[in-house]
Image: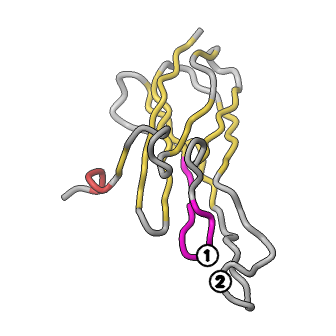
């Protein structure tokens, strides 16, 4: 079995683990734009010590290119952990990440998120050049 066979995908409106990619459908070449990636937009994902999203990564695959390029990654480290016990801590990180990037070719944005219980999830969004 390959690594890619372990990544799950679904409609983010019906599955709480799928990363949601929000950004422009079309951008100008070599001009910065912003992309927000979140988990739990329609159906909230638990954010507890026992069940949480640990990280989100964003990649870009240029049209016609074999390889993908990592744009960035955001780790979420606080999930209510405390010396007092699980879910009693003073801080919680929420699985929302803002990426500022630019591209010089049309292609596909690919987001991957990791749930500490349910594994890897992905979603993608096509992006065109103006």
Q: What element carries label 2?
A: loop
The single residue placed furthest to the left in the displayed view is 1
Q: Residue 104 carries which label?
A: none
List the single residue furthest toward the top.
130
Q: Mark 1 points at which residue?
A: 49
**Is 88 located above or below residue 112 in the figure?**
below
Q: Residue 83 in magenta?
A: no
Q: Which of 84 and 14 is in front in this view?
A: 14
Q: In this view, does 9 lie to the left or right of 81?
A: left
x, y (%) of residue 77?
A: 66, 69
- Residue 9, position as x, y percentages in the image: 37, 44
Residue at 81% over, 75% down: 90
Quadrant assignment, res 130: top right
Which residue carries the number 2 mark?
A: 86
Q: Quadrant of the N terminus?
A: bottom left
Question: What range of the chain is rendered magenta?
Answer: 46-57
Q: Residue 101 appears in which quarter of the rendering?
A: top right
Secondary structure beneath label 1: loop
Residue 17 vertical position relative to residue 35 in the rendered view, above or below:
below
Place of residue 63 in the rendered image (x, y in percent of width and height, measured from the top left): 40, 22
Residue 34 vertical placement versus 81 (above, below): above
If you read the primary sequence from the N terminus, does the residue marked by circle 2 or circle 1 appear first? Answer: 1
């Amino acid at each position: 079995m390959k690594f890619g066979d372990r990544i799950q995908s679904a409609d983010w409106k019906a599955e709480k683990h799928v990363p949601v990619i929000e950004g422009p459908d079309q951008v100008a070449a070599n001009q910065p734009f912003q992309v927000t990636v979140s988990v739990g937009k329609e159906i909230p994902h638990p954010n507890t010590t026992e069940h949480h999203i640990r990280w989100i990564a964003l990649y870009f695959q240029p049209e016609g290119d074999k390889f993908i390029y990592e744009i960035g990654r955001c780790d979420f480290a606080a999930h209510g952990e405390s010396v007092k016990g699980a879910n009693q801590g003073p801080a919680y990180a929420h699985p929302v990440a803002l990426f500022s990037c630019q591209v010089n070719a049309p292609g596909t944005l690919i987001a991957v998120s990791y749930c500490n219980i349910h594994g890897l999830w992905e979603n993608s969004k096509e992006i065109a050049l103006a």
